[in-house]
Image (cartoon, helix red, strand yellow):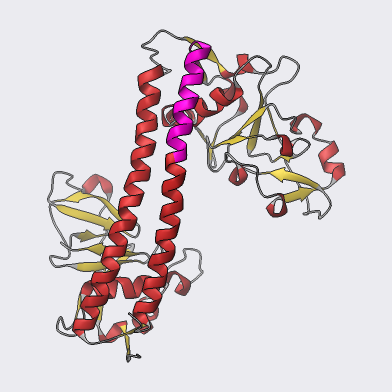
Amino acid sequence: MSWPDARVQDIAVAHYGKALKKEHRDETGNYSVFGSSGQIGKHSDFVADFPTLIIGRKGSVGEVIWAPEGGWVIDTAFYLELLDHEAIDLRYLFYALKRANLSAKTITTSIPGLNRDDLYDTQIPLPPLPEQKRIAAILDKADAIRRKRQQAIQLADDFLRAVFLDMFGDPVTNPKGWNVVELSTLVDPDDKLNYGVVQPGDNEEDGVPLVRSGDLSDVTPDVSQLRRVSTSIDSKHRKSKLKGNEILIACVGTIGRVGWVSEAMIGWNIARAVTRIPIREGVNREYVYRYLQNPVVQGYFERETRAVAQPTLNVGLIAKTPVALPPHDLQIAFLERYRTIQAYKERLLVALGAQDELAGCLSQRAFAGQL
């Protein structure tokens, strides 16, 4: 079944939001404050006292946000007012505009943004109102399942943090009286913390794989997707070549992000934005790795970040990271709990991926008139 298309201009008025600095907000107010990426606070006044959709104009360009009670919309976003409630269902319009991929209409200037004329020219299929409501109800159910999966994943992360605090306490205040040492004391005495290649040069097809901050994770990066540096550049940075006993920490960009070095990565090199931490023999490297990943310790990195042109962690600050060293059997117990929770979380992530795929398929079929 095919339906006629309609332009946004024929459906709704796109109003510009109004500036409202953070220091001028009344956080005790009853109205939500929205920016281009979603709710950012509360206020005692509003610019829209009706259900609306908020469209990111700058920043999160093209983001579509549901605001069923209206609120204050700041000047980085538009908010929509329907022209005829008997012709268009707001919830249907929400899904239709998300599917329209408004971010693709971004104007690239010094400050990328979404032009209102481009928003107005956007076309969406417009079935009869009862059909709009039926489609919105179906997609709402799919979205509700997806949000429950996301909440379960967040609960798994929260539970892991709670387990960490219950077993070890805050390493800064150290309420359990564990032996707390600086990370540098766990480093191989014949090696040291160091960062990697400063100027990697051109990507060399037959060069040495280079691990950057965005490549850090629990698993071995896909080597086919990595940048490679020439052997001549690699030879000038022997101290940052991976040996297999390291933990990696991002010191620029995704600060504090931690990466595991597998046997397959031995001989690779790291970029300037990554710090290499060679763990000495006799230390439980996996425990230290999971310890550094925990939100409690990640908060340490955030507090200690040195702000220059961009937030940066230097090697000296990383070396001073406090690490609690409880008895070995307790370290093992923590890792066992971690693996159990992580396995559960990974199952949820797989289910969420399947749900996303299903939701995408439902959306495609719905707007093609095939549901």
Q: Quadrant of residue 45?
A: bottom left
Say left or right for 247 vs 349: right
Query: Is residue 232 found left or right of 105 in the rendered image?
Result: right
Q: Is residue 261 visible?
A: yes
Q: Residue at x 30, y 51 (%)?
A: 148
Instruction: Judge whether 63 appears above or below 367 on screen.
Output: above
Given residues 93 and 369, the one toward you in this image is 369
Q: Position of residue 327 (x, y in %)?
A: 50, 10
Q: Quadrant of residue 243?
A: top right
Magenta residue check for 248: no
Relative side of 191 to 133, left or right? right
Q: Is residue 15 visible?
A: no
Residue at the (40%, 13%) spot, across then down: 174
x, y percent for residue 355: 39, 60
Would residue 114 be found to the left or right of residue 32 on screen? right
Q: Is residue 329 magenta?
A: yes
What residue do we see at 74% from left, 20% from top?
191
- Please, is residue 8 above or below residue 139 in the view? below
Return the residue nearer the eye: 321 or 14. 321
Residue closer to the observer: 225 or 213:
225
Magenta: predominant secondary structure element?
helix
Q: Nearer the viewer, residue 232 or 295?
A: 295
Q: Quadrant of the C terminus?
A: bottom left
Quadrant for the N terminus, please: bottom left
Q: Could you say where residue 363 lies in the image, as x and y percent from the top left?
A: 37, 73
Is residue 341 positioned above or below 230 on the image? above
Position in image of residue 20 (x %, y %): 25, 55
Q: Which residues are magenta?
A: 324-343
